Each structure stands twice: as C-alpha cells, then as structure tokens.
Image (cartoon, helix red, strand yellow):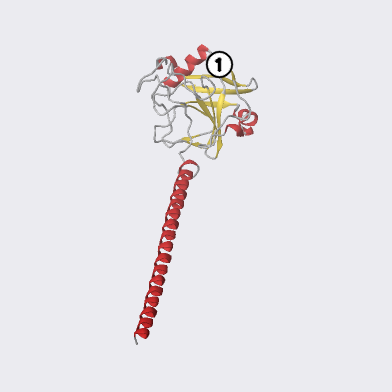
Amino acid sequence: MASSRQQREQREARERLRAYQARQEVHEVRERRRRRDNVVGIVGGIVVAALAITTQVLYFTQGPGAPAPAPSASPSPSAAADQNVGAPDASLAEDRVWTGELVFNDDVTLGISLDGTAAPQAVAGWVQDVQDGYYVDKTCHRLGDAENFQLIQCGSIDGTGAPDPEFSYGPVENAPADGSYAPGTIAMARGDSVYSNGHQFFIITGETKLPTTTGGYTVVGTVTSGLDQLIEKITSAGIDPATVNPQDGTGKPLVPTTITRVTLQ
C-alpha cells in the first residue's frame, strides 16, 4: 500500500511539474509577444512621426504652404530702421516724369518712363544712380518664370542679390493695393524693412501677383517700348537649371544679362 501511495504521489508531483512548466511556457510566450508588440508600436510611432514631419516640410517648402516668391534683396546690416542711408532727397525727382533708355547686352533697348510724382524717393534714387553711372555693367541675377510670378531682377552691387550697405531708403511708394503688377512695370526690390529699397529693381514680364502683407513694392515706372525684345532675347530662354532656388523656383537667367547703358532726361 505504501508503495502504491508513493507512486501516486510521484505521479501527481510529475503532473504538477508539467502543469507548472506549461504555465511558464505560456507566460514566456505572452511576454515575448508583449515585447514584440511594444517594439512594433514604437517603430510604427517613429515612422508615423517621420512621415508627418516630412509632409509638413514639403508642404511649407514646395507645396501650397510654401511662401509666395517675392523680389528681395538681402537685409542691409548697416541700415537703421526708418532711416535713409546714402539716398538723395526726394526733391531730386523734381516732381515730374523722367524718360530714357535701359539697355541690356547692347542689343535689347527698353524705353522707360519713371514717375517722380508718384514715387519721388525711388525716382530720386534712380536719378542719382544714373548720374553716378552705377548701373552700367551691373547684372540681372534673378529670373522668375512661374505662373503669376514673371520678372527679371537687376542691379545688385555684386551680382549675387546682395544689397549695398551704404545705400538704402524708404518708405514703399506707389504700390498696388491688390498686389497685381502688370507686364512692363518697373518696381524696386527690397528686404523685410520698408526702408530696405536700394539699387535693385525688377521688370515684370508677365502678369504677376506679389504679397501685400508687408507693404508691397514701390512701382517706380514702366517700360514704354522694347518689352517684347526683352522677353524674346532674354527671359523666354528661362532659368539656368544649375542655379534654381528650390524654395521659390527662381534663378539666374540662362542668357547672361548685363546693363550696358542707362539714360534719363
């Protein structure tokens, strides 16, 4: 009898051991599955976050959220806020219309008209620059050929778009309230401040819409003849692909463009 009882107890002990081992195996499987699910969840969260960040970057740099392109010069570090630096008095514009010629590459001649009544400070700047011979041999460093943004920008002191730290003025004059700039418009490029106008100007070559939230851009005058030459011989060739700015799609004209003569009277 004792032997039978011992055998039964041993058998029950073995069964309890097997049951315990089975429970342990189930527990270990559940733990491995939980750890795996946690890893998958973390990786999934990282992937989702990365996709969200990438989507936002694309939206705000290349998509609808990208800032509207605008003619601009780099801020001048020496120009004080609300102060003219090196610019002539607005009276130099003589409160009248100035006419003359703006010549590119010796073979594209534009007739121009500058309105000293509507934009006296900007026209005074032009008159001084022409009298000083500033514009001759300066280049056109920026071309925009996108829909609603078609222009060529010229007059940078070093051909890169940098401003002249010794010449800046304001405020913005004669800017269209709705931000619409018609073909043939001559306007002044500037930085963030309304007192960052300088030598740089742009000529609108197709219907163009520019931001109005920062005050717009001074319309200094118009092209009265030769706009078709400018488009045919220079801007229609497009942008040098090696110079395209990924943020706004502008770049250097594929046809290198230099101002070779300017007259005003």
Q: Can residue 230 be seen in this view?
A: yes
Task: Write down the residue under mark 1.
Answer: 263
Circle 1 crowding by C-alpha within 10 Å: few under 14, some 14–19, many from 20:
some
Observer-nearest of 31 and 153: 31
Quadrant where the N terminus is found in the figure = bottom left
List the single residue furthest toward the front: 2
Image coords of residue 57 (percent x, y) = 46, 43
Image location (x, y in percent) of residue 35: 42, 59
| Residue farthest toward the top in the current orientation of the protein | 132
Q: Which residue is drawn at 48% across and 18% down?
A: 126
Towards the viewer: 69 or 76: 76
Is 230 displayed left or right of 17 in the figure? right
**Residue 239 visible in the current orientation:** no
Q: What type is the residue that disc 1 sits on?
A: Thr
**Residue pushed farthest bottom?**
1
Residue drawn at x 38%, y 18% is: 84
Count of numbered circles in the view: 1
| Residue under the point 39% across and 80% down | 11
Q: Position of residue 257 (x, y in %)?
A: 60, 24
Q: Dot 1: what SS?
A: strand
Where does residue 106 sit, x and y in percent of width and height?
Answer: 64, 19
Query: Splitting the image into 4 quarters, where does residue 262 fall?
Result: top right
User: Which quadrant holds residue 143?
Assistant: top right
